[in-house]
Image: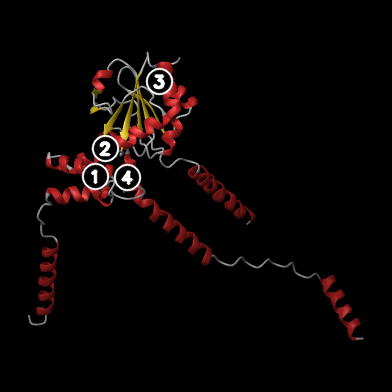
Amino acid sequence: MSRSLPAVAIGCLLALVALFALRPGSPPTDAQRADALAHELRCPDCAGLSVADSPTSAAQEMRRQIVELVAGGASDAEVRQHFVDRYGDWIRLAPSSPVAWLIPFAVLIAGVGALTAWLVRRPSPPVPTPPISADERRRLREEAEALDA
Amino acid sequence: MRWRWLLIPIVVLPLGWLLFTGFSLDPRAVASPLIGQPAPAWTYTTLDGEELSSADLAGRPYVVNFWASWCAPCVEEHPVLSAAWDQHSDDLAMIGVLYSDSRDNAESFLDRYGRAGYPTVVDESGALAIDFGVVGPPETFFVDADGIVREKQTGPLTAESMDRHLASIGIGR
């Protein structure tokens, strides 16, 4: 019994950690949701900035509309769609298709695979030389003897 | 083993083609989801202080041009818009939308480059620009008599592009 005590203690500790990590969090407030959505959407008249990070009047108006839509009961997906309907998928800073997220990993794996295959490829076998005939052997011996003489 | 050398053109040529075509595209020319859809409804005040609504234009094809006094390509296309208005004002409506700019600056622009004769509404909050999915001026939308957006021009209009877009809403054919 005393031998299994440490294992039981570690098990209990892990269970507590898992419970703490998986505890249900409090739902985000409207302001938190609006801020998160503003970070997901592209400012239309600046280069590569989110609506949350841009001071332009277009970004300010988009932030105002996000707050208004969230307060009006729109879901996150409905708020995103409100802007996608006007600008297309371009207005989202992150791609919506999961395939787009997989492409860099697929290219990385293919590259590592190609490099590994190139590094570990077997050396090509030596080209076999045809055996020397008896006639050639005789001529070689004669020429060697002539050189020695 | 020689076939491996074929890998170089097989990889390099498509990559080169992708880069060449990619860099020759206009990054602002975002395809508009509004094409083929009903134009957004709006009611705004013009520079002259009169209220104008999209409902007032029902049954007529119209052109919506987003512009600003600080926008150099807007100066470039201004004569094209004026000429189109002079030529087709009996058959269509044209509306300028002041984008992210002040009334005073807009008046100075029109004093300097000429008042074309069609109204400009002031989109102070930028809400109309968002409804049309505008990225930056000049952008021009061509709406047919049924209220459907038929085409969009990103960047300055030329006489040739103006004629082509107007034809899409049944003007000048």
Above or below residue A146? Residue A81 is above
User: What number is the disc on residue A97?
Assistant: 4
Q: Is residue A13 left or right of residue B104?
A: left
Q: Quadrant of the N terminus of chain A?
A: bottom left
Between the residue at mark 2 and the residue at mark 4, the CA separation in whole angstroms equals 29 Å
Protein chain holding label 3: B
Q: Position of residue B90 (x, y in %)?
A: 37, 13
According to the picture, the residue beneath numbered tag 2 turns out to be B126
Q: Is residue B103 left or right of residue A30?
A: right
Which of disc 2 and disc 3 is earlier in sequence?
3
Q: Are marks 1 and 3 in contact (CB under 8 Å)?
A: no
Protein chain holding label 4: A
Q: Are marks 2 and 1 in contact (CB under 8 Å)?
A: yes
According to the picture, the residue beneath numbered tag 1 turns out to be A60
Q: Amino acid at mark 3?
A: Trp
**B112 vs B23, nearest the viewer:** B112
Residue in the image at 45% along x and 56% along y: A110
Judging from the image, what secondary structure is the residue with disc 2 in? Answer: loop
Between the residue at mark 1 and the residue at mark 3, the CA separation in whole angstroms equals 34 Å
Residue in the image at 38% along x and 26% along y: B115
Q: Are marks 3 and 4 in contact (CB under 8 Å)?
A: no
Q: Position of residue A47 (x, y in %)?
A: 36, 48
According to the picture, the residue beneath numbered tag 3 turns out to be B85
Task: Please tell me if label 4 and label 1 are on a single chain.
Answer: yes
Classed neighbour count for the residue bearing mark 3: other residues with Cα under 10 Å, few (<14), some (14–19), many (≥20): some
Above or below residue B117? Residue B128 is below
Q: Amino acid at mark 1?
A: Gln
Judging from the image, what secondary structure is the residue with disc 3 in? Answer: helix
Q: Quadrant of the C terminus of chain A?
A: bottom right
